[in-house]
Amino acid sequence: MALMVVKFDLKKRVKLAQTVWFMYWFAVLAGILVLSLGLFFKIELRKRSELMDNNESHFLPNLLIAMGLIACGMNAFGGKVCYDSLDPIKFAKWKPMLKPFLVFCLGFNALLVVTALLCFVMRIPLQFTLAEGLKNGMKYYKDTDTPGRCYMKRTLDLMQMEFRCCGNDHYRDWFEIQWVSNRYLDFSAKEVKDRIGSNVDGQYLMDGVPFSCCNPSSPRPCIQHQMTNNSAHYSYDHYTEELNVWRRGCRDALLSYYGGIMNTIGALVCTLNPLQVAVTIGLQYVDSSLSTLANPEDIESESEGFLLEKTVKETFTDIMAKMKAMGKGTKVEEGGEEGVATPQEGGFSS
């Protein structure tokens, strides 16, 4: 017995086809939007790819681009089928393709769910990727003369100004690395000698941050050097006074920015999924209602549309039986190949 049977006459079939056709083209627009956001996300990641610890972060935008392209092509095809369903002659050429297409649509809908989940879950690995990438980037900040790293200073400065952040987790992260190149240090100066000598790794560490950490909204001129030395600045106490550098870490700022993009795309994909399910069901009813015409030669005759030709249990049983049959067929073919090979081996031995 068919599942969710609906009776159709010509007027209802036309209305169904037109409605599903409209929904398909709306789904095409949603696919274009997913594709566009995937491209935008990829471009945004590439802008700061040197601050990423690996290339795995590009997996999600690549998946979104692929899903957007597939959605556009698949829904355009579905819209064309619905449009041609109003003409029996044109619809006849699409009829053999519909069952494989509907199965593909089911697989695509499942993949959409996975994609939506990834948009929300990928924030976790991105956090670790940014933490390690920023840590390495800060180490290379001073290497303005080193090929392959000379751009890092500019990248970090622009990022800190754009996202109003400083350091990896905190502005004090800059206190733990040498971010001034040796070419700009006077090694004959006592202060430089003392700082390098007091460090196990021989680095020139100081309680200062790059200029890009300064907050231009602060009324006081930026204090970016000797930040923990109260006597170096007039009327200043770094324990109590509001510092005029950005306090927010760049990892948190970037994670918030990229996380916002991923959440927006995830919400869009979640919205697209019910629409894809709806058009898949609609196309199934269009197909079944045209396949069960009381008089195939009379387009105006009544028909029945259904979601499944049999009940869910019977459909599941049929699928399992077909899978078992395919498995047995494969074993028979393998056994046949072994049987052919055995006499050949015996012939050689004699």
Image: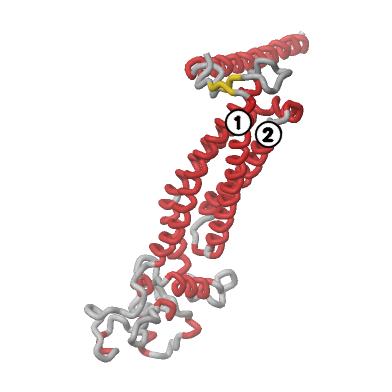
Q: CA distance from mark 1 to mark 2?
A: 8 Å
The residue carrying mark 2 is 81
Q: Position of residue 197 (x, y in %)?
A: 36, 80
- Which quarter of the picture shows residue 90? top right
Q: Residue at 69% x, 15% y: name it.
A: 295
Q: In this figure, which residue is indicated by the disc labeled 1?
A: 283
- Could you tell me which residue is drawn at 62 percent across and 43 percent down? 25
Most distant residue in the left direction? 240
Task: Give whichever of 46, 287 is nearer the camera.
Answer: 287
The vertical placement of 230 against 112, above or below, is below
The picture places residue 77, in percent across and down from the top left corner, at 67, 38
Report whether 36 appears left or right of 238: right
- The amino acid type found where label 2 is placed reads Val
C-beta proximity under 8 Å, tags 1 and 2 = yes
- Taking depth in this image into account, of 143 and 282 the one nearest to the observer is 282
In this rendering, position of residue 233 left or right of residue 139: left
